[in-house]
Amino acid sequence: MWQGGVIFGDIKWARGLLFLCGCWLPVEAKETVVERWALEVVATLPHEPDAFTQGLLLHDGYLYESTGLYGRSSLRKVDPESGEVVQRLALDPGYFGEGLERVGNRLIQLTWKEGLALVYDLDTLTLVQAHQYGGEGWGLCFDGESLWMSDGSATLYRRDPVDFSHQSSVTVMQQDWPRDRLNDLACVGDYIYANIWKEQRIVRIDKHSGRVDADIDATPLLALSGRPADPEAVLNGIAHDPQSNEFYLTGKHWPRMFRVRFVPTAR
């Protein structure tokens, strides 16, 4: 493997040099500790089962949701308690809706392979602008200064919230291995929480270093979700409530949504 090969080669060279110098210093491997967390279900809420959930955010008492699939993608404003869709906008059949975030009075919705970030008026859900980008669009969140975008790889891209231009990127590492399949995102302070596509887990990422420092087991939600027997009906959709520090979680075609707390467990 490339990682093992490079590191092993460097260690052999360093040890040989130290031997020639007539001295020896131990070479210590640094391993990032990843905490194992569980989740506590605070409330079980209804969720429209036709929603192929790709992006989720909470604002002013409402959930805003982006749903995918060609010919069925949408942007929705949802009452979280009743699950009622208050406003709904159908996307062009040629667009596959993905991650969603709010910046001021604008909503920004990614598209999967179309290379467009669609910008809407928050109140009317009227399309007002579109930004182009390269590659795929998966998840999106806003930390108050920059947008963070995932594309299914182990890279998170930092983008300008006004013109969507690329600012920088960071590689996400979990115990010194790239952590790919990053899907929907939620920005919380110095951290980014990410769904892992087709895995029943969420990781917490230090946005400055890219290091995963917490791995959250969401497996208990599967039995509670009422999800259909469909391999695509996976966990996806994460929204943070800053007032309670709780999260809303759901999945693609899940008839239920959950308000949860993340709880560190004993190692």
Image (spheres, rainbow, N blue to C red):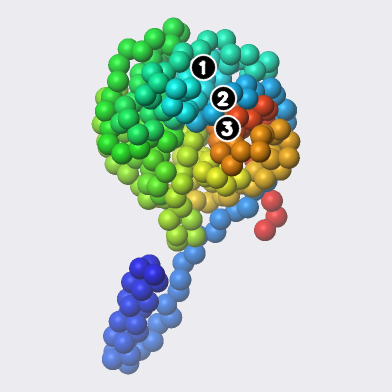
Amino acid at dot 1: Arg
Measured from the top left, where is residue 242 in percent x and y? Answer: 57, 27
Tags 2 and 1 touching, CB below 8 Å: yes
Instruction: Report if residue 3 is visible in the image.
Output: yes
Q: Nearer the viewer, residue 47 or 205?
A: 47
Q: In which quarter of the image is the N terminus?
A: bottom left
Q: Mark 1 points at which residue?
A: 76
Amino acid at dot 2: Ala
Q: Name the residue under label 2.
A: 51
| Residue 15 occupies quadrant | bottom left
Q: Name the residue under label 3.
A: 252
Tell me if residue 201 comes above or below residue 251 in the rendering. Answer: below
Amino acid at dot 3: Lys
Q: Which of 81 and 190 is in front in this view?
A: 81
Q: Nearer the viewer, mark 2 or mark 1?
A: 2
Helix, strand or loop under label 1:
strand
Q: Which residue is drawn at 33% across and 90% down?
A: 19
Measured from the top left, where is residue 75 in percent x and y? Answer: 47, 18
